[in-house]
Amino acid sequence: MSHTIVTYDGKLLSTGRFEGNDVYVPFDVPVESGGTGLAPSPTDYLAAALGGCLLATMGMIAARREWDLTGTTATVEKETTTTKPLRIARLATTIRIPNGAPFDADQRNTLERASQHCTVHHSLHPDIDAPITFVWE
């Protein structure tokens, strides 16, 4: 089990601390809701967590097979609803693999299937549309 402690700092800003590694991250309310724009919003971190989890999951498979995914990126586009209750409606991810040509069809299939085991992706509410697109450059 892990613990994250989030402290409200005032003026719509908070700071999260991840126990065990003492990493601190700032949180802000979106500008359109009165935030300052000084830090990502909690939903921005969810989008980043999805991208990070997808790459980490693929990376574990690649490392076992000694495949190089260096430079691979995950771009997550977050769309929220405009009516209340406000929520994330869509997290569309594009994964770009540079120098993808060395990967044959079976290797590409293995990596794409691996992404389907991302814990964050599995944890999303079923109402959130979360497609994943792969671009083999």
Image: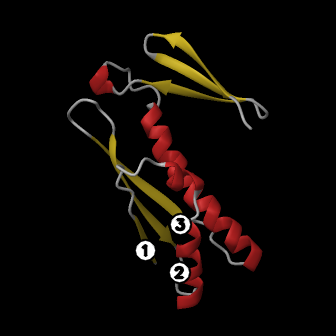
| Position of residue 5 measured from the top left corner of the image (x, y, whole percent) | 65, 23
Mark 1, mark 3: which one is toward the viewer? 3
Q: Amino acid at mark 1?
A: Val
Compute the Cα span from label 1 to label 3. Answer: 16 Å
Q: Earlier in the sequence, mark 1 or mark 3?
A: 3
Q: Which residue does the image show at 68% across and 72% down from the upper left?
A: 61
| Position of residue 33 measured from the top left corner of the image (x, y, whole percent) | 30, 22
Position of 77 relative to 54 (above/below): above
Label 3 residue SS: loop
Which residue matches tag 1? 135
| Position of residue 85 measured from the top left corner of the image (x, y, whole percent) | 28, 30
Q: Is residue 133 left or right of residue 70?
A: left
Circles 2 and 1: CB distance less than 8 Å? yes
Which residue matches tag 2? 100
Question: From the image, which quarter does the N terminus lie in?
Answer: top right
Q: Earlier in the sequence, mark 2 or mark 3?
A: 2
- Mark 1 surroundings: few (<14), some (14-19) or many (≥20) residues within 10 A: few
Which residue matches tag 3? 116
Q: Which residue does the image show at 55% across and 74% down from the upper left?
A: 113
Mark 2, mark 3: which one is toward the viewer? 3
Position of 54 relative to 90 (above/below): below
Residue 60, by quadrant, is bottom right
